[in-house]
Amino acid sequence: MKTSTSQSLFAEAQRLIPGGVNSPVRACKSVGCDPRFILRAAGARIFDADGNEYIDFIGSWGPMILGHNHPAVLEAIRQAMANGTSFGAPCPLEVELAAMVTDALPSVDMVRFVNSGTEATMSAVRLARGYTGRKVIVKFDGCYHGHADSFLVKAGSGIITLGIPGSPGVPDDIVRNTISIPYNNEEILEKTLRDSALDIACVIVEPVAGNMGVVLPAPGFLEKLRALTSELGIVLIFDEVITGFRVSYGGAQQKFNIMPDLTCLGKIIGGGLPVGAYGGKKEIMSLISPLGPVYQAGTLSGNPLAMAAGVATLKALQEPGFYDRLERKAAGFADSLQQLAAKYLAEATLNRQGSVMTLFFGPGPISDFDSAMRADAAKYARFYREMLELGIYLAPSQFEGMFLSAAHTSEDLAKTLEMTEWSFKKIQN
Ligand SMILES: *Cc1c(COP(=O)(O)O)cnc(C)c1O
């Protein structure tokens, strides 16, 4: 496979941009190769600067649930663009998307749009602190909630991928107010919350964890979390930046039938443009400026192009049977993948929720950060490199999800399985 154009772009990028990338995992360091520079994408395919074609299982890390360049989304952006790209004033599309989001998520009475998932979680925590008058936040080891200071304690995503404990530049004073505990451990959860109840503003959780690889909530875990936080007057924040409109139209809260107090969204609601959102109960959301005293703002927030892409995406997701079809496709693919893994790998564990899954190169069950860490990341790296050469574009880290979209055809998936078998054979020993 020719990669000289990507190589020279990467050399130039490294001179100009730290590490040559604008988000760390993209540098592909943990899988031991250089990134391919992407020129364009269509459906389930992406094409790099050297003209190589790949079947894409990253989907821009989740937003592209319809596939790349969905015609209805492109058309909506085109129409919005003809009217101007940013006004810094309210626009009709914001109201339309807000109505769709509040209809989709029964726990959300009001929603505020921002420009990224990071902004959504950061703002939700500020709001929870403002609402409760308490300082401490509780999160779970291996969950990722964007790159705001308070969350960079035992965080997932690039922090795990690069094997760094936290981040310099985050003052001790800030992380002192963050408690990180194991995912899926009800005993530690209960003890932690009861011991510090009067100081804890919120618990933030990925209701299905997606940033230490996919890790499902154990039966009863989210229920316990809801019951305890309600009892102790702690705000429960579901970070549904990945799961929102992914695991069902109403996100994980609909799937598991648990109502959080606040919800963070991102990725899919922007249809591939930069959008985040946080929303929840009216009583809490009413504290946000200018209705209340908790300040949060954004020059480009509610941007008309981004809102148009979001509205068009959600409309497409409302098509009857959309999630059932995606589930069937993902389930069939996962079954075959698991059979191949059982045949060729000594140890493998597949975790899946709907159309997002992780094949861990390690023993199961994988239910938290420590069990995820038992996976053989070096073996995954070899697998990744084989697959890339065969035209299959996977996440460049063992600790990320594999995203299926409506655009993956049965031929795409059959080809992927064929290449997987080929790659497993090569890395067997
Ligand atoms: C991606 C992600 C974020 C951060 O969103 P950005 O748009 O990258 O800032 C937050 N929470 C979760 C669960 C995510 O997966």
Image (cartoon, helix red, strand yellow):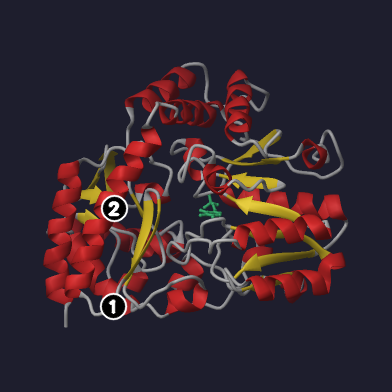
Q: Is residue 368 left or right of residue 136?
A: left
What residue appears at the point 62 percent right and 58 percent down from the top-left corner?
222
If the image is split into quadrants, where does the C terminus sit? bottom left
Circle 2: residue type: Phe
Q: How many marks?
A: 2
Viewer can see residue 20: no
Q: Position of residue 86 (x, y in %)?
A: 57, 27
Q: Position of residue 46 (x, y in %)?
A: 25, 45
The answer to whether residue 266 is above or below residue 215 is above
What residue appears at the point 60 percent right and 73 percent down from the top-left corner?
182
Any atom of ligand 1 within 8 Å of the CB at mark 2? no
If the image is split into quadrants, where does the N terminus sit? bottom left
Q: Position of residue 129 (x, y in %)?
A: 81, 55
Q: Label 2 crowding class (10 Å Cα cut-off): few <14, some 14-19, many 20+?
A: some
**Which element is circle 2 on?**
loop
Task: Name the disc covering residue 347, or none.
Answer: 1
Circle 1: residue type: Glu
How far is the residue under mark 1 from the one under mark 2?
Answer: 33 Å
Any atom of ligand 1 within 8 Å of the CB at mark 1? no
> Of residues 189 and 18, which is closer to you in this image?
189
> Of residues 102 and 189, which is closer to you in this image?
189
Badge nearest the viewer, 1 or 2: 1
